[in-house]
Structures are given as C-alpha cells and as structure tokens.
Image (cartoon, rainbow, N blue to C red):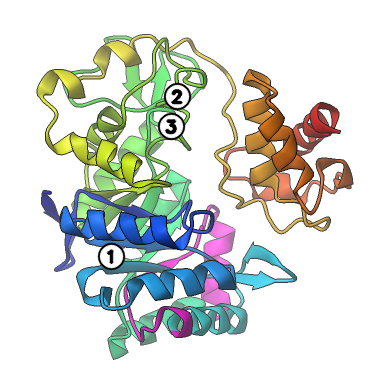
Amino acid sequence: MKLRKLGRTDLMVSEIGFGCTYFRTIDDGEFDRLLTTGIAAGMNIMDVCISEPGPRDKMGKALQGRRDKLILQGHIGLTYEDGQYSRTQDLAKSVKHLEDLYERLETNYLDIAMLHCIDTVAEYEEAVRTGLIDYMLEQKQKGIFRYLGFSSHDPETSMVMVNSGHFDVVMFSINPLFDLVLNDMKRFFSRATEGALPSNLNVDAKRAAFYALCEEKGVGITVMKGLGAGTLVNPDETPFASAMTVSQCVHYALNRPGVGSVLIGLKTEAQLIEALHYFDADASELDYSEILASITGSESIRCLYCNHCLPCPSKIDIGAVTRLLDSGKLELAEGLCSEYSNLKAKASQCVECGACMTRCPFGIDVVSNMEKAAAMFE
C-alpha cells in the first residue's frame, strides 16, 4: 500500500480506502473480513456516511479495537427521520444525528468532518445561515473535528467552498463518466493521465479548474463513485466499447490533481483483493487510453444509486428500485423479481411529486424510472 499526504493536512492516507456504500447490506462476518484484510494491506481511511441505526451499530462493533488504525471521514448535515435518510442543513438535527454516530461507533471525534452533499451555493449559504459552518469551526478549534471537509458533485459550488478557506478536504465524484467532453458534445466523460488522452478529448473546463484550485489551495480530495456504481467495470453497462478494470479506474482517479485516496464501495473480500491488485499491476494493465478513445457520445447518465434523492413521501427506496430496473433491462431473472417483491414500498406508489428530481445530483428522470420499474415488476 502506498500512502499520500492529504492536501495541507498532516494525514497520510492510503491510496485506496474504504467507501461505505454497501456497509448497510453486508453481514457482520463479511464486514469483519473486509476490515481485517484491508487494514492488514495498509488501508487506513474509511468514509462513514450511514444514517440507519442498525448499520451504524454493526460498524461500531466491527471498529472495536481498530479505531486508532483508521482515519474516519464522517458526515454532518444528514439525518434519519421516519425511517428514511435525508440531507439537511438544520443545525439541531445535524448535531443530534452526529452525536448518535459517536455513540454507536464508540468514538468521540472525527478525523475529517464532512459537510454532507452540498451541490448548490444555496445549500452552502443555508449551512452558513443556520450556524452549521460555525459549529464545524468550533468543533475543529476544540479538536473534536481534526479537519473539515465537504462532499459534493458540483465543481462550481465546490470552488466557492474551497475559496472560503474553511475546508481542508473535499469528497468529490471522480470517474471516467464525468470529466471529459467529446469535442463540442455536452456529455461529460473522464480525464486520462496527462499525455494519454486521445486527441479528440478535452477536459471539461469547470472540473479542470476545480482540480487545479484544490491543488493550489492545498485542499485534499477523497474520491467517491470511482467505479461509477460499478458501471465502468461491467461489460453490460459500460458507455465505452469495453469495460475498464478496477485498477484502471483507480489509476485514473489517482492521477487527478489533489487526489489523496480513492474510496471504493466493497461488498466482499474478493472485491477488495481485486482492488488491491492495483499495486501489483504493470503499466500496460493501467493504460486506459484505448478505452476512452471508444467513447460513443451517449447523451444520458445513469442513476448511481446514491439515494441523495431521498426522502420520498411514499418511502420508496429509489436507489434499490432503480438498481433492480437497470439489472432487469439486461435479464429479468427470478431473483430480481423476488428482491422487488420484498421491498416495503413499490415503484407504483410514486406520487410524481418530483422532489426527488430536484435533489438528484445527476439530473435523473426519477419519476420515469419509477414508471418503468412498476411496468417491469408489477
């Protein structure tokens, strides 16, 4: 494992870290194996963005005796109400939910405190107005938050926040679906290593400016959605002529300016071992220039199942429904139908309020997806 200094902090982070996407779904034994294998390999940073009480308890149990081995990147600005995750800039709700995290993880500090999922300047201004930013600064002064950060999918909003001078770290979505445009097309794709770009690809100017600003200001980047929710490494879902490997996705992200660690969502120990192969891969295995040259120019981006669209008034787990929909388009297997039937709220319960679509960082037509899922499974 290689370590990198994370921006201007004094943290040396592993180039591959633990994302928490699947922590809520894997059993205790597999979770323990992931931590044991990862820590033994030198992984030392973990994102903690889980709102549900049960998974928080599971994580707290697994972290016993390991807290000092991990740099915890925790989030403030989310809550869990009426059985659903929700983003919030409300100070009281945010603090209450954070204190619940401390209790369940049996810790009393965060190495990196992330203002959660700020994708518009208006959301950032609301966090200032409610006193949430002042609270974070006070907690840093007390040493309870060692460093401050924020998570975002939007480069323009992120630049405003980096320029505020308050933040040491940003968790940003970086993968080969977001960074590149094909000549005059409006579709975002990713950026390859300098000198390895096909001649007809150009780095999106806003994202390039954001990366450069982070490097200039010493703001470290931890990467989320590095595999595009698995889309980039799945031959049936990739937007390219062929799928990338996990190692190629990691290599791509680590070559963006300012990046310290790529936090990968893992379900199994086998997936972890596949990710760790990055450190043994030779140059030919890491070269992705031919794959990027195969970009076809698809005009749409798929749901990444992040559930930032929640809460839903009908309590639909939108990410789970959409994942089943996407899988069903490839093969409507009996297991998918069974998973769908076990969901507490079905897609047909969508009231088409559209609130989910205003929250989606990627502009997904969620209502249309719910209609398609209802037609497919019901």
The answer to whether residue 317 is magenta is: no
Residue drawn where x is 47% and y is 29% of the image:
231
Mark 1 sits on what residue? 168
Relative placement, left or right, of 187 versus 111 is right
Question: Viewer-proximal residue, 110 or 106?
Answer: 106
Q: Which amino acid does label 2 sit on?
A: Asn
Return the disc, 2 or 1, that comes first in the chain's sequence: 1
Question: Viewer-proximal residue, 366 or 135?
Answer: 366
Q: Which amino acid does label 1 sit on?
A: Asp
Residue drawn where x is 34% and y is 22% of the image:
244
Quarter occupied by residue 331: top right
Question: Viewer-proximal residue, 156 or 192?
Answer: 192
In this rendering, the answer to whether 199 lies above or below 280 is: above
Return the disc, 2 or 3, that comes first in the chain's sequence: 3
The answer to whether residue 127 is magenta is: yes
Question: Viewer-proximal residue, 271 or 141?
Answer: 271
Q: Which of marks 2 and 3 is in front?
A: 2
Task: Assign a secondary structure to mark 1.
Answer: loop
How many numbered callouts?
A: 3
How far separated are the C-alphas under marks 2 and 3? 17 Å
Task: Assign a secondary structure to mark 3.
Answer: loop
In this rendering, the answer to whether 180 lies above or below 200 is: below
Relative placement, left or right, of 374 versus 214 is right
Q: Residue 175 appears at what percent x and percent y?
A: 38, 34
How far separated are the C-alphas under marks 2 and 1? 34 Å
Look at the numbered discs 1 and 3 and tell me whether their residues touch, using CB distance below 8 Å: no
Mark 2 sits on what residue? 234
**Residue span colored magenta:** 103-131
Quarter occupied by residue 73: bottom left
- Mark sitting on residue 178: 3
